[in-house]
Image (cartoon, rainbow, N blue to C red):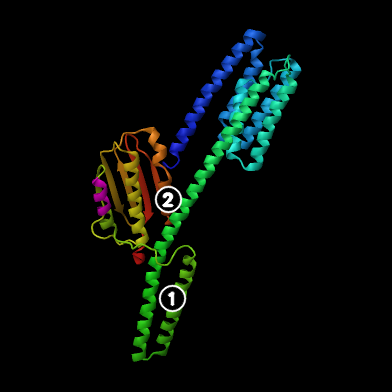
Amino acid sequence: MNLRHRPTVRVDVAIDAGLGVIFAIALVGHAAAIAASWGDTSWQFGFATGAAASVVALVRRRHLTLAASAGLAIAATAMLVAWVADLPAEPGPATALALSVLVGSAIRKLPTRPAGVVTAAGFVLVAASWIAFPSASSAIPNVTVLNGAAWLTAIAAGLGLRLLDTRRQATIDVIRRDERLELARELHDVVAHHITGIVLQSQAAQLVAHTQPRTTLADSFAGIEVSGSEALAAMRRVVGLLRDADDAAPTTSVPEQLEDLVNRFNSHGPKVHLHAPDGEPPWTPELTSTVYRIVQESLTNVARHAPDASSVAVSITQDHQTITVEVVDDAPSVSARHHHRDGFGLIGMRERVEALGGSLQAGPRAVTGWSVLANLPAPPPEAR
């Protein structure tokens, strides 16, 4: 089961459920007030308009541009009908609230130009309500005050959330870049090691060929040496743009690293039960370091966000096609932790895992605790 987007979906559903309750209260309250002051049936048009706008606001996530356009059209039509038929001023409270949600969502999510168009259209409605339903005194009409306040609130909330989203995306981009650079460093060292071996072997073969002259063999090995040297130089030039040549950390075997990591964690955290392959798995160094980093990040998240956990199970298994890494804790389920535990660290891990052709899922378990599950493609025998 893919848990990658489930926390976000839950939050969206909760927000929309809360908005639905608020819309219902606004609709009923306004209808009761209009019925008391205008008559028994005068509330029906405003109630229908507000209900329609509220429904559009609640389904806005499916197509925000269309929803915002529909909400503005409903409000404009209601205003025109109310002005011509001498009905209570529109947009009413429920419609104004729905427009606030639509305008705020548009400012937050849409590109700059359509977001600006929706914002400007909202201002036009506010100004039109002032003209269509003037106050008997010199004061600003109540309907204009209501819709103006809703419009300004939408702008403030939309811009604030847009700024937060932009900052979060910038942080995510930095994390992804750093993770890619780290993986590039490891790949550079691994490939450089193998290519250097090829060059050395070809040089040795040429020495043997000199003692046992075979022109064709010597020429072939000379070509291998030239090709290998050129490939190594080219790779160093390209990767040199991303890193310093001497800053790569050495890679050691998974069981030894994980045992040290688990021992350090056990000294200040819940008991960790490690189940890993015996001996040194025949994995490539980039897979080795990725497995280690997944476990490290998962245990760090347990220490930070699950202080009530009493134990953690780390399981590493492999079949012919897949290496599976699963880290599960038994902390009590607390919904407030879900967002934090699926934070920036796991974004970096997901970037690394997907770069190697795998997948990573993280989320709350059915009963208690949190699970991080990564599946990595096992290397072919010749790559091990």
Residue visible at 42% across and 80% down in the picture = 225
Q: Secondary structure at mark 2?
A: helix
Instruction: For the N terminus, give its image quadrant.
Output: top left
Instruction: For the C terminus, give its image quadrant.
Output: bottom left
Residue visible at 44% across and 38% down in the picture = 6
Magenta highlight on residue 261: yes
Query: Outermost residue toward the front?
Result: 138
Magenta highlight on residue 69: no
Residue visible at 40% across and 72% down in the picture = 195
Residue at the spot of label 1 = 228
Q: Which residues are magenta?
A: 259-267
Q: Earlier in the sequence, mark 1 or mark 2?
A: 1
Residue at the spot of label 2 = 348
- Badge 2: residue crowd in 10 Å (few <14, some 14–19, many ≥20): many
Q: Nearer the viewer, residue 308 or 135?
A: 135
What percent of the width, then of the height, locates residue 194? 37, 71
Is there any visible trace of residue 286 in the rendered image?
yes
On screen, residue 239 above or below 312: below
- Badge 1: residue crowd in 10 Å (few <14, some 14–19, many ≥20): many
